[in-house]
Structures are given as C-alpha cells and as structure tokens.
C-alpha cells in the first residue's frame, strides 16, 4: 500500500512522467534484448535529429525526467540496465525538445570488458564527461 500511496501523492505531471518512463523502459528493455543494436542505433539517430524547441523550464524537465526514469526502474520487477535507462531518458528528452546526446562506452577492467551507457543534456558540459571518463565513448547518438 505504501508505494501506491506515494504514487498518488505525486503531482499529476510527475505521475504522467513516471508512467511514460515505465512504458519506455519496458519497450527499451525488450528492444535491447531482442533487436540488433544497429536497428536501435538507426531509430535513435533518426529520432535524435528532430527539431529542438525552446524549453523555458529546461532544468526542471531534466530533473523530473531523471527522477521519473529512476523511480520507474526501481519499481519494475526486472532489472533495468543502463542502456535501457539511457534509451528511455534520451527519448523523453527529445520528445520535449531538450537537446540530448546518448553515449555508449567501454573500458577494460581486470582483463574483462565493461560497457556503460549515459545521456548528457549538454554535450559540452564537463560534469557529464568527467563522471564517465573511465569509459571510452564508442557510440554517440544525437
């Protein structure tokens, strides 16, 4: 009962964002598991090149999207990997006209390859690059 009560205590806008994030996480998770990445790449590249709108509450939308994806990923019964979360966030950003770039990177760690995906809303921003500096960006979309 606690989770449902918390959900209904959110504002209408936050509930809409959480529902959208849950649906996009479901779809992105299915796509990552069943569709070749070259097709996902083509779709996101075409989707990412849309026209950008002037977002007057850019910072608020960015925080709300990040929070909604995080909340939804924690509530869903399966584990959402960083690639699924990044795809969902990227699509939510682009739907609102927020310029976003999705990065997929890799690094060598103890003779094994580790991969990670992340989204930057400001590609020139050093914070986004520095927190993922251990990974070499292999793919850049947007």
Image (tube, rainbow, N blue to C red):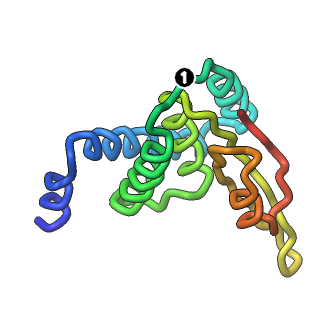
The x and y percentages for residue 137 are: 83, 52
Q: Is 15 on the left-hand or right-hand side of 79?
A: left
Residue situated in front as seen by the camera: 121 or 82? 121
Residue at which label 1 appears: 53
Residue at the image point whose x is 80% and y is 65% from the top: 133
The residue sitting at the top extreme is 51
Q: How many marks?
A: 1
Is the N terminus in the top left, top right, bottom left or bottom right quadrant?
A: bottom left
**Vertical order, 25 against 38 (above or below):** below
The x and y percentages for residue 20 are: 36, 38
The residue sitting at the front extreme is 56
Residue situated in front as seen by the camera: 54 or 34? 54
Residue at the image point whose x is 18% and y is 61% from the top: 6
Q: Is 19 on the left-hand or right-hand side of 127?
A: left
Residue at the image point whose x is 87% and y is 70% from the top: 108
Is the C terminus in the top left, top right, bottom left or bottom right quadrant?
A: top right
Residue at the image point whose x is 73% and y is 36% from the top: 141
Q: Is 121 on the left-hand or right-hand side of 16?
A: right
Q: Is 77 on the left-hand or right-hand side of 13?
A: right
Quarter of the figure with residue 42 = top right
Mark 1 closeness class: few <14, some 14–19, many ≥20 residues within 10 Å: few
Q: Secondary structure at mark 1?
A: loop
The x and y percentages for residue 82 are: 60, 57
Residue situated in front as seen by the camera: 119 or 122? 122
């Amino acid at each position: 009962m606690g989770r449902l009560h918390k959900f209904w205590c959110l504002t209408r806008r936050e509930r809409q964002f959480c529902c959208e994030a849950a649906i996009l996480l479901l779809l992105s998770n299915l796509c990552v598991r069943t569709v070749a990445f070259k097709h996902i790449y083509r779709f996101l590249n075409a989707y990412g090149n849309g026209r950008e709108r002037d977002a007057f509450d850019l910072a608020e939308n960015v925080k709300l999207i990040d929070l909604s994806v995080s909340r939804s990923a924690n509530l869903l019964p399966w584990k959402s990997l960083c690639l699924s979360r990044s795809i969902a966030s990227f699509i939510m950003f682009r739907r609102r006209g927020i310029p976003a770039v999705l990065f997929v990177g890799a690094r060598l760690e103890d003779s094994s390859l580790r991969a990670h995906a992340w989204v930057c809303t400001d590609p020139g921003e050093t914070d986004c690059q520095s927190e993922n500096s251990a990974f070499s960006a292999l793919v850049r979309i947007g």
